[in-house]
């Protein structure tokens, strides 16, 4: 049997990158002989995260159109043409058996080049509202793996398979880790723990809301793990001077499994992968959707859970004023915490990466 060759393209944020890596690892479990090539966008975080996960990646000079008038938009058609030419060359030289797109700028040129070369293509759409790139590619893709019901409004019904979102398996294995987590973050085992995560790039509004609530939370005797992202980190460090015993500030949490293991309540953006992870670890959560996300998909993701009484939702514009009080109200309400945990649990898909891997191999076989 010949070795398989698969291209996986897309990225831009952890919400695209981590599912891509999870899919590759799941395929590798089934077919260890598979050779992978990732294709991302130059300067984006996939160019670092993918090699860290042990896979080869090449970058396209692709960029998105800016929503406001800017000189950068003048470069867009030239970068698109250059990326299309490079994608065609990558496909011709690598000769993949399958191309997988996970959303993000790079997946457009690459999957179009693959289709023109008669290579089967599979899309993975993480959100409840499909991104523009995937909506365009979905018309010609062979299979589309989705995480939510009702995606027929974006894609041909006969191509859709409901799989859930693939997440990093090591992140959701929490059994027996709470004591280790308490030691890792140097926490007090007798206090309630709040986890703040603003996505892989941080969240300015959430960070400012935390900054305002510090003294309020200190008086209430809770402890906080605060992932700030790169841009807010220095400011957050200044804000927590003298509070280090109960307020743990970090730019990026590498051991999310331990962070989840000790959290009684989570405040998070509503990116698809964050939502999927929180469903699988059954954590009571307050979602703060990023309003500038494409097609406002984070609000749609969070609304699905809020409607099912599986999470609380605070609008980004209201977070600075409301977060402090809302956290204190919820973290001390054991009945509501238990209700949220019970309601969010059935919404997670434990075997999403394996389901997508099997669909990928079926396409190659066919």
Image: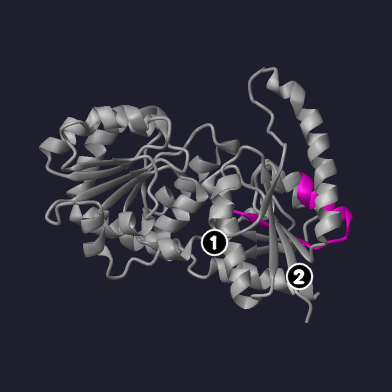
Name the side, left or right, on which 60 lies relative to 340. right
Q: Position of residue 199 (x, y in %)?
A: 45, 43
Q: Which residues are magenta?
A: 109-125
Q: What residue appears at the point 78 percent right and 82 percent down from the top-left corner?
A: 1
Residue at the (77%, 49%) spot, across then down: 110
Q: Is residue 216 above or below residue 52?
A: above
Mark 2, Cα crowd under 10 Å, few <14 / some 14-19 / many 20+, is some
Residue carrying label 1: 166
- Circle 1 Cα neighbour tier, 10 Å, few/some/many (<14 / 14–19 / ≥20): many
Establish if 201 lies above or below 114.
above
Seen in the picture, residue 76 relative to 145 is either above or below; the reply is above
SS of the residue under disc 2: helix
Q: Residue at x 50, y 53 (%)?
A: 273
As drawn, is 209 to the left or to the right of 295?
A: left
Snapshot quadrant of residue 83: top right
Can you identify the residue that label 2 sits on? 363
Q: Secondary structure at mark 1?
A: loop
């Amino acid at each position: 049997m010949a070795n398989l060759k698969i291209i996986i393209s897309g990225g831009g944020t952890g919400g695209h990158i981590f599912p891509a890596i999870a899919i590759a690892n799941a395929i590798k479990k089934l077919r260890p002989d598979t050779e992978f090539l990732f294709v991302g966008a130059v300067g984006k975080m996939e160019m670092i995260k993918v090699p860290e996960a042990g896979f080869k990646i090449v970058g396209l000079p692709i960029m998105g159109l800016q929503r406001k008038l800017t000189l950068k938009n003048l470069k867009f058609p030239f970068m698109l043409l250059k990326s299309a030419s490079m994608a065609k060359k990558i496909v011709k030289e690598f000769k993949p058996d399958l191309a997988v797109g996970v959303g993000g700028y790079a997946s457009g040129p690459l999957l179009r080049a693959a289709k023109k070369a008669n290579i089967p293509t599979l899309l993975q759409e993480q959100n409840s509202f499909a991104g523009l790139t995937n909506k365009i590619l979905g018309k010609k893709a062979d299979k589309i793996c989705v995480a939510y019901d009702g995606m027929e409004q974006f894609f041909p019904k006969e191509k859709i398979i409901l799989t859930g979102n693939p997440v990093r398996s090591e992140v959701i294995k929490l059994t027996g880790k709470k004591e280790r987590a308490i030691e890792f973050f140097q926490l007090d085992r007798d206090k309630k723990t709040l986890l703040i995560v603003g996505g892989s790039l941080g969240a300015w509004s959430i960070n400012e809301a935390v900054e305002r609530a510090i003294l309020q939370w200190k008086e209430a005797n809770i402890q906080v793990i605060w992932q700030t992202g790169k841009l807010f980190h220095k400011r957050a460090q200044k804000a927590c001077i003298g509070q280090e015993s109960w307020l743990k500030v970090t730019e990026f949490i590498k051991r999310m499994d331990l962070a989840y293991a000790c959290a009684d309540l989570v405040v998070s953006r509503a990116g698809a992968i964050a939502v999927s992870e929180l469903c699988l670890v059954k954590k009571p959560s307050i979602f703060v959707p990023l309003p500038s996300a494409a097609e406002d998909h984070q609000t749609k993701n969070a609304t699905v859970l809020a409607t099912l009484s599986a999470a609380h939702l605070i609008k980004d514009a209201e977070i600075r004023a409301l977060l402090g009080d809302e956290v204190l109200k919820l973290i001390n309400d054991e009945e509501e915490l238990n209700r949220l945990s019970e309601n969010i649990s059935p919404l997670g898909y434990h075997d999403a990466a394996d389901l997508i891997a099997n669909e990928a191999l079926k396409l190659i076989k066919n």
